[in-house]
Image (cartoon, rainbow, N blue to C red):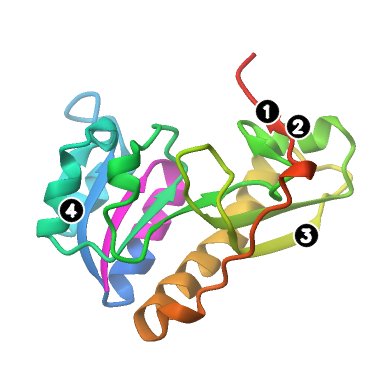
Amino acid sequence: MNVLLVAEESAGAQTLKALAQGGHRIVGVMTSPPKNATAGSAVWKLATQLGCQVWPAQVVKDPGFAERMHSDQVDILLNVHSLHIICKEVLGAPRLGSFNMHPGPLPRYAGLNAVSWAIYRGEGTHGVTIHKMFPAIDTGPIVYQSLFPIGPEETGLSLSLKCVRKGIPLLLQLVETASHDPVTIPLLPQDLSKREYFGTG
């Protein structure tokens, strides 16, 4: 399975490590470059240590990069905690599609800061969703979703960590399914009448 990983933060580094341990071919990693010689992207540093090809994250906006993906025979693109909007040509280039780990239960918590909004609104449960990526943000069909309770002392950080702990195994399950029997990847259309989108404003 040829994987292209677009990733940031600790969640991205954990996903990269798990993919490398799973024996999949990591075609490349797209992430924010280090700001200087001593500080910067943990994902970039780990990818370099693992010998992966690394590109700056903003390259996902370049339609021409799709040709590189075709030549590298990318099977699947995984997006983990990267907020760069991926252009439609890059989204459509992988043989099996592009997939995102979203830290919220779709379709009700699309967009940004889902964990903080869930706490603010007094939700009793939250979730993490693996979904296929369409050009419209967080609208693609759901592959896997895990729901879990929000504790009484929950913070944005603790709830984000729960999403990561529950989400990475779902991503790995997706990659395994894609490797062995891709036609069985679940693709449940979202009920967009229940969609709520949280933006920056």
Which region is colored magenta? 1-16
- Which residue matches tag 4? 69
Viewer-side label of 1, 3: 1
Residue nearest the observer in this picture, 111 or 139: 139
Mark 1 or mark 2, which is nearer the start of the sequence? 2
Distance of mark 1 from mark 3, alpha carbons? 21 Å
The amino acid type of the residue labelled 3 equals Phe
Mark 3 or mark 4, which is nearer the start of the sequence? 4
Q: Residues within 10 Å of mark 2 (few under 14, many from 20)?
A: some
Mark 1 or mark 4, which is nearer the start of the sequence? 4
- The quarter of the picture where the C terminus appears is top right
Distance of mark 4 from mark 1, alpha carbons? 31 Å
- Which residue matches tag 2? 117
Question: Dot 3: what SS?
Answer: strand
- Which residue matches tag 3? 148
Residue at 31 percent of width and 73 percent of height: 21
Question: Dot 1: what SS?
Answer: strand
Residue lying furthest top: 201
The amino acid type of the residue labelled 2 equals Trp
- Which residue matches tag 1? 198
Mark 3 or mark 1, which is nearer the start of the sequence? 3
Is 15 covered by the magenta stretch?
yes
The amino acid type of the residue labelled 4 equals Met
Residue at 69 percent of width and 63 percent of height: 146
Residue 154 image point, x, y percent: 79, 42
Distance of mark 4 from mark 2, alpha carbons? 36 Å
Viewer-side label of 4, 3: 4
Distance of mark 4 from mark 3, alpha carbons? 36 Å
The amino acid type of the residue labelled 1 equals Phe
Distance of mark 2 from mark 1, alpha carbons? 8 Å
